[in-house]
Amino acid sequence: MAWVERRGNKWRVRYWKPDGRAASVPGSFETEPAARAHADQLNAAPSEPTEQTHDPTHPAPRPAAPAAPTTPAAPHAVTVAEWAEIWWQTLDIGDNTRAYYRSLLTCHVLPRWGATPVDQITPADVQVWLNRLRDTYATATITGLRKLFAMVMTDAVDNQLLATNPVRPRRRGRGRIEPRREATWADEHQVLTIAHRILRLASRNQCLLVITAAYTGMRWGELAGLHRDNLDITHGRLYVTADAGALHEVNGHLTLGHPKTHASVRTITLPPFLTQLLATDLAASTRPFVFTTPRGKHLRRSGFQRRLWTPAVSGGRHRSETWTPIKQGLTFHGLRHSHKTWLIEDGVPEVAQARRLGHTMENKIDNVYAHVATSVDARLLAGLEARWHRSIERYRQNRNDQGAPPIAS
């Protein structure tokens, strides 16, 4: 079976060759009806001769002239859109990753490649497409598109829809020299200033959210989904569980589910000051989750970012005060980078950093961590405790007893 395909402003007719490869009828057609008419001619198979009884009174009919050879019937060519629909059903990924992939597919991949047969895409076509996108989109977006499209086409190869993957890493050319962007982080004094500002803007609970993020390195979803049953005040620990260890926000819907990775399921020890702050805050409320809105509802990242985080970090006019900016480009996730930086500064072993942050180490040395966990954790927590008290002392000196209500005495 032949089919038609648009190429720029014209149309061409495609068919399958006997060796199983797709080919094109030479030339092109100005309109789709003209191309379809030619494809229909190729698809029209000759009628089979029927058996007739010989009648001696009538001469036998002259044998028909042999029919001209016809193009072999071609199976339907699988387009990228058709394959992507099948491929999508094979994924086993988290809700946030699924939403990210769906956005890249619907906004970028399918508008460009959806109608194209998967075996008609060349590496040059892909590279030209990505190069053009660089003028409009960030490097991270281009990298994400390349990785996603590569996954889609790799699975197409595995399913024998094409021979090789046309989405390949760049191995030639000098490429673009992008400035190296290091993760933005804050020191303990900047964290305390942000926390105090959020205390002024909202509540003690959301102020404490910032402090907990900086002194545990937890992700936003892990903090927003932390149930009070998973906080052990007696022993100074909290638990990120496998079944409901994170709050997911996808397309405006909030659900509790598993954290980002298997390594994210972990126990996090707390410095004494933080245990006390959390105990005091929870004692004043019966809400089921540790960090919520003032009305006890789940926190939404976008609302927290807009109403609290941005004003506190970027500065500006607040009532009768003028707040100076804290640090350009600092995000809430930057508190996680801050925690890791603090651990590095305090000489905490890399294996302990990985366990605390929920990272997977490429080698197997994390197996030895259990033998030294107690002494390492004690040193880690002592460093965090000292950092907190340094920040409190400097904050008091800078405010000269004129400012914000204290978080802790």
Image (tube, rainbow, N blue to C red):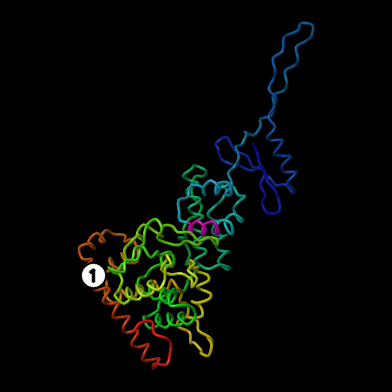
Residue 253 percent coordinates (x, y): 53, 60
- The location of residue 131, given as percent across then percent down, is 55, 63
Q: Position of residue 357 (x, y in %)?
A: 34, 66
Which residue corresponds to the image point at 40% horizontal and 64% vertical from the top-left? 227
Residue 363's place in the image compared with 57, above or below, is below
Q: Quadrant of the N terminus?
A: top right
Left or right? Give the position of 227 relative to 41. Answer: left
Quadrant the C terminus occupies: bottom left
Task: Give 248 or 366, whichever is nearer the viewer.
Answer: 248
Question: In terms of image quadrants, where is residue 218?
Answer: bottom left
| Residue lying furthest top | 56
Q: Look at the image and give the residue range highlighted in magenta.
A: 95-104
Q: Residue at x 57, y 34 (%)?
A: 18
Residue type at numbered disc 1: Val
Magenta region, main secondary structure: helix
Which residue is under mark 1?
Answer: 376
Residue 387, x across and y down, in percent: 31, 80
- Compared with 317, 100 (above or below) is above
For the residue labelled by badge 1, is the local secondary structure a helix, a strand or a loop? helix
Compared with 106, 78 (above or below) is above
